[in-house]
Amino acid sequence: MSTARLAPDILAGLQLVLTQVSRGQLAAATSQVGELHVECEALGRQVPRRVLVVIIPSPLTREALALASHVGAMVEVLRQARQADRLAPRYQQAATQLRLAVFMSLTTGELTLARRMSAGAVPPLLDAERLRIHLLRCPPADRGRLSDTFQDASGYHGRGMMVRCPVYDDHLICLLPLEHDGARTDCGLAAPLQALVRDNPHYALGISAPVPLLATARAYDQARHALAVACHTPDRVADYHGQAPLAGLLPRRQALAWARAFLEAINAAPRLTLEITSLALSFPRSGVARLLDVSRNTVTAHLGRVQDALGLVLRDPRSRAELALALAITDLPLPEGNAVAEHVPIASVGSLLSTEAAITWAHAFFQPLQLGTDRTVHQTLRAWIEAGTDAQRTARHLGISRTTVRAHLCTAEQLLKRSLLPPGPGTHELVHAFRIADRAP
């Protein structure tokens, strides 16, 4: 841009000089166009450089020339400041997306992929052996502010990392590394997070158990269960104190043979179909669509193919629980010696859930419920599962209000120390516990 009354033919006569200054061949130049004196000076360091052009009837004094140069430098500073203001939100968005990508890679056990995608700016978290996940529930508008407050110049949060959950708008996922002895966090975020909850009545915090870095997905599930408990406690902070997963307690070879046979029909399915199926067992379909940046119709189409191949109805919590169990079993390490389970007779899932270990697990699962309430909560849970986790249908079946159903579910979350709303891993365990209890002596 230029001041008024600057004829285009004057700039045309300066084309050669302007090109040399802009390309960095000259830092400044003085020339004559007709009877006018022209002073040109390069601004900034990035090539092509902007050029300050001063056109006057007579040569400038040394003081006036210095003042013009100073004005040009100030204009360049203001331009860079405005550009920085425009770029800052893009940088923050890119940093947010990278943190989410690293977290998603860790939840699938892809540590090498997480390193590759953050090459040149690898988060210190990836050098940790173990971590805890602190899952903070807060108003959606606070998540960005909190993440920015603790963010350092590298785009991370010291040795830790904060990730805005793409599924639940009021969840902030905080990955905190542990010392080698696992005794405490060393990234300085644990205490501030608990202080935030103490000072804000609308906040709650669920904390996972210490897990290896490659078990990030398990830590996230634990933190979700702990958060469900924290929401019903006076101090709104809860640590995870759950049982060992059912999949790891079943007879290893027989369970693997059953799981492989159960999943055989989708072994050749595209990777995206398998990822969508796995995520849909823990999140609502709209959340899966946001996680993978696909449409909800795409998610539904992939799940439809899995349903048809396996002969399941994935809106039925019992079918979802059975599929989740099979996937969990195949995710476990192979039996010792990498023995293949194909030669083991394929047992039914009913026989697997009738083992002593499964019965003991189910008894421990229900024990807090039996000690903490009368039978009404237990009956509501069973009716809720039979109604496909539909609270309205459950209320009609039991002749109570939907609010009462939800209150019973909240009580169950607090006693069982599991997240049941929305349905997910906690609901799967509830289905298995009922199935085992119904078959047990």
Image (cartoon, grey):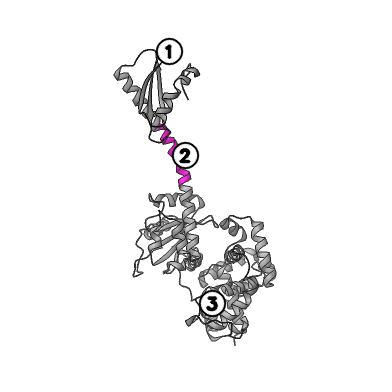
Q: Secondary structure at mark 1?
A: loop
- Type of amino acid at the residue the image marks with label 2: Arg
Closer to the camera in the image, 386 or 257:
257
Above or below residue 402? Residue 293 is above
Residue lying farthest to the bottom in this orientation: 441
For the residues labelled 1 and 3, the Cα–Cα distance comes to 89 Å
Going 68% across and 68% down the picture, which residue do you hit? 307
Q: How many marks?
A: 3
For the C terminus, the image quarter is: bottom right
**Is residue 89 on the magenta stretch?**
yes
How far across and down, in percent of the image, does residue 166 sit?
A: 53, 56
Residue lying farthest to the left in this orientation: 62
Which callout, 1 or 2, points at the residue further toward the start of the chain? 1
Residue wearing tag 2: 86
Chain part drawn in magenta: 78-91
Q: Secondary structure at mark 2?
A: helix
How far across and down, in percent of the image, does residue 135 sit?
A: 47, 61
**Is residue 36 on the magenta stretch?**
no
- Type of amino acid at the residue the image marks with label 1: Gly
For the residues labelled 1 and 2, the Cα–Cα distance comes to 41 Å
Task: State the image quarter where residue 75 is shown.
Answer: top left
Instruction: Say whether residue 202 is visible.
Output: no
How far across and down, in percent of the image, does residue 14 sit?
A: 44, 21
Going 46% across and 60% down the picture, which residue do you hit? 114
- Type of amino acid at the residue the image marks with label 3: Ala
